[in-house]
Amino acid sequence: MKMSKIAYKPVGLALGAGTGLLAGAAFKQAWKLIGHQDDAPNATDEDRTWKEILIAAALQGAIFAVVKASVDRAGAVTTRKVTGSWPG
């Protein structure tokens, strides 16, 4: 196994934990702007429409994917700077 992959494992785990928190906070702020409400709907919210629930789910998924890709990429770039090789 390459040294850069070994070095990236703990970095990737730490970044993964922070990614969920960051994505959750970003989604909460985005929903306040788009939905004009503090709380996003859950799939089981009886008082919410299908449209509202599916838009919230799509937005949450998109935000999580963008945040995860950004954090993973930044971690890989940092690992290359530290070790001299790409972790992939």
Image: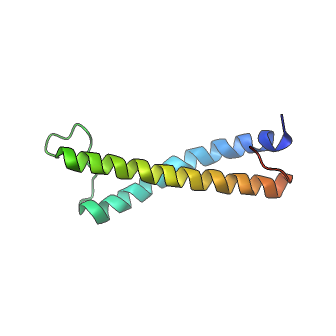
Residue 33 vs residue 63: left or right?
left
Residue 79 vs residue 17: left or right?
right
Q: Quadrant of the N terminus?
A: top right
Q: Position of residue 41 (x, y in %)?
A: 25, 47
Q: Residue furthest left?
A: 47
Kindly identify the residue that appears in the image at 38 percent across and 50 percent down: 60
Q: How is the image coloured?
A: rainbow
User: Picture quarter containing residue 29?
Assistant: bottom left
Q: Residue furthest top?
A: 1
Can residue 10 be seen in this snapshot? yes
Q: Position of residue 82 (x, y in %)?
A: 82, 55
Seen from the viewer's position, the closer of residues 7 and 77 is 77
Residue 51 vs residue 86: left or right?
left
Kindly identify the residue that appears in the image at 62 percent across and 48 percent down: 15
Can residue 21 be seen in this snapshot? no
Q: Quadrant of the C terminus?
A: top right
Q: Is residue 38 above or below residue 54?
A: below
Q: Is residue 65 above or below residue 37?
A: above
The number of callouts visible is: 0
Q: Position of residue 33 (x, y in %)?
A: 30, 66
Kindly identify the residue that appears in the image at 57 percent across and 44 percent down: 17
Kindly identify the residue that appears in the image at 59 percent across and 44 percent down: 16
Q: Position of residue 69 (x, y in %)?
A: 57, 51
Q: Residue furthest bottom?
A: 33
